[in-house]
Structures are given as C-alpha cells and as structure tokens.
Amino acid sequence: MATSPDDIDILEKAKSALPTDYVPSDDEEYMNEQQQTYFKVLLLEWKRSIHDAAGQTLQSLQDGPIREPDLNDRASSETDWGIELRTRDRQRKLISKIDSSLRRIEEGEYGYCEITGDPIGLKRLIARPVATMTVEAQEAHERREKISRDD
C-alpha cells in the first residue's frame, strides 16, 4: 500500500510531537532499547494523530448533509467527501499496521524483515515505521504480485 500525502503529513506531525530530540543512528547497536522506545512512541503518536484526524472528519459529517444549491457545487462537495472517506478507510487499515508494528516491538521482532530476518534499516523505518520487509524483499514481493496480476 502506497503512502498518501495525508499519511506523510500526519507522520511528520507525529515525529515533531515526539518528546525528545533523539533520532536513531547507525552508530549505535541496531534495535537497542532506546531505538525501540523511539519507534514505539512514534507509532503511538502516529496512531493518535490518525484518530484525531478521523474525529475531525466524523464531526464534519455530523454537522450536516451537503446542501449546496448549485448542482455542480453539490457534486464537487460529494466528490470531496468521497475522497475524504476513502482516506479515512486507508488510515483505518494503517492503524492495523501500526498495531501490528507495536506487537512486533513487544515481541522483539520489530526492525527485522519478516521474510529474510535481515535488519530493515533505520532510514527505511524512520521513513515508513510500519515497514515489515527490507527494500529488496519488498521489491521482490511487488514483482511477484505484478506477475500474478498480469497472468
């Protein structure tokens, strides 16, 4: 699943809300306790930010139906709402991935590829904290998916 600009914005807000200036570094032991704590706090903050955004959408929906007098304006508003609802559905699925990542931290599996067992890498995890595969394993997975779709 590709990351949407909205998801990136929410992730960046979550990163800026972290309580410390600590950023994991390649100079330290991979997935040490401090790194695990960093990613746990980041994932929890990201999840909270998504819930906040969903609450705002829900409040807007409850404020009333679309009552644009002009048909074109109404169609535009309905399209906007459709996009917003699809975004929230995508974020609902993202929350499931965040929860899975939090479980992986608790189980000591976070940061390691679920296919190869190799370290995923800090840069990838900082960019995509819910990553479960190395770049190479992800690319191979996507190639297999494309081949099966093309058949």
Image (cartoon, rainbow, N blue to C red):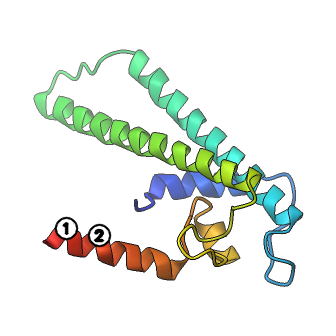
Report the front residue among 102 and 7: 102
Residue 44 on image: x %, y %: 70, 45
**Side (left or right) of 24 relative to 77:** right
Whether residue 16 appears in this view of the structure is no
Whether residue 151 appears in this view of the structure is yes
Can you tell which quarter of the image residue 68 is in? Answer: top left
Report the front residue among 49 and 105: 105
Q: Measured along the vertical axis of the image, is residue 63 above or below residue 28?
A: above
Residue 54 on image: x %, y %: 51, 33
The residue type indicated by label 2 comes to Glu
Q: Measured along the vertical axis of the image, is residue 147 above or below residue 93?
A: below
Q: Are marks 2 and 1 in contact (CB under 8 Å)?
A: yes
**Side (left or right) of 65 relative to 15:** left
Quarter of the picture containing the N terminus is bottom left
Q: Which residue is mark 1?
A: 149
> Which element is circle 1 on?
helix
Query: Which residue sits at x=75%, y=59%?
Result: 108
Query: Which residue sits at x=85%, y=52%?
Result: 19
**Side (left or right) of 92 relative to 105:** left
Residue 143 on image: x %, y %: 32, 78
Residue 87 on image: x %, y %: 39, 44
The residue type indicated by label 1 comes to Arg
Query: Which residue sits at x=45%, y=74%?
Result: 138
Q: Measured along the vertical axis of the image, is residue 126 above or below residue 100?
A: below
Q: Which residue is mark 2?
A: 145
